Amino acid sequence: MKTILITGATSGIGKATAGLLATQENTLVLCGRRAERLQELSDALSSKTRVHTLCFDVRDRNQVLEQINSLPEDLKQIDVLINNAGNAHGLDFIQDGSLDDWDAMMDGNVKGLLYVTKAVLPGMIAARQGHIINIGSIAAKEVYPRGNVYCASKHAVDALTSAMRQDLLEYGIKVSAIHPGLVNTEFSTVRFKGDTDRADAVYQGMTPLVADDIAEIIAFAISRPRHVNLADLLVLPLDQAGATLVKRKE
Ligand code: NDP
Ligand code: 8X3
């Protein structure tokens, strides 16, 4: 029985991962900002396993530390941390970008991941075991036009994943990154600020990944024997060969 903390569990990849891991004898700590969605998740999954929810914004370092430190004694020791919370905000040329969008991406995708990791790490270091899985992106490996700050934030996640793996080597802590290509979640709706037509166009004429595809890979990574680390994995739909190289039907 592992205790697994998932950020961004209220939607998309995080929610699918929670649903799958709940069926595999894990205790779940599910995090997000939308309290009503956390309650719905807890109601849906509590018949399968023990679920504890934490409502916080990963950008707020005080909230992150307070909430994670507020865990009941028997849940304080996190075995697996899935740093999944994140989004893109906007798709603009660098000269047209919004400072608020830039802050949201750098503060959420990079600093938020750091704050959560900082809060969870002392227990892993003391136990000399643990597994951190960072959800990167194909945008961590390539930049694409108008992706600028989102790509920079995910390149930072990629760099931090390698850095964590080096710094935590001595403590027996696994650090993995899973980098998805196009996954049909609420991601594009958030990026385009609720414009669902524009969001739907991202996946038009091609078959994207779905959240369950990534959830299965996360569960596989967690299930490897202790000596095996899936360190860095790019996962693409068949119809995608690069950030902007997508085969679409007419
Ligand atoms: P969704 O928009 O469906 O889910 C994003 C999740 O992150 C939500 O649960 C949201 O919860 C949470 N979140 C976002 N910002 C914050 C914040 N400031 N504080 C706390 N939680 C936050 O998108 P996905 O499931 O697709 O995205 C999950 C991860 O996968 C992200 O890191 C994304 O960059 C990455 N990714 C997605 C791809 C895709 O094509 N969909 C491809 C590659 C990577 P709430 O709003 O309740 O706080
Ligand atoms: C999400 C995939 O291609 O929009 O990380 O950057 S992409």
Image (cartoon, grey):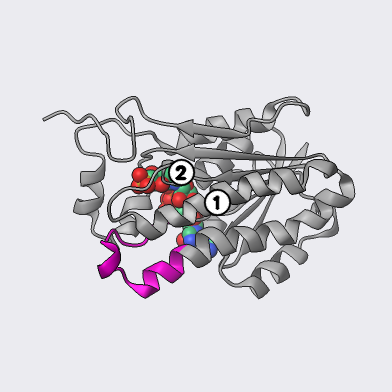
Q: Which residue is drawn at 70% across and 26% down?
A: 224
Residue 13 vertical position relative to residue 196 in the rendered view, above or below: above
Question: Where is residue 195 shown, x and y percent of the image?
Answer: 23, 59
Disc sitting over residue 96 in the figure: none
Q: Choose the circle earlier in sequence order: 1 or 2.
A: 2
Q: Which residue is labeled 1 in the image?
A: 157
Q: Are marks 1 and 2 in contact (CB under 8 Å)?
A: yes
Q: Which residue is labeled 2 in the image?
A: 137
Q: Which residues are drawn in magenta?
A: 87-105
Residue behind label 2 places its C-beta within 8 angstroms of ligand 2: yes
Q: Residue at x 58, y 43 (%)?
A: 18
Q: Which residue is drawn at 37% across and 48% down?
A: 143
Front one among 150 and 184: 150
Alpha carbon separation for disc pair 1 and 2: 9 Å
Quadrant for the N terminus, please. Answer: top right
Residue 8 vertical position relative to residue 205 in the rendered view, above or below: below
Q: Does the magenta stretch include residue 38?
A: no
Can residue 150 be seen here? The reply is yes
Front one among 198 and 122: 122
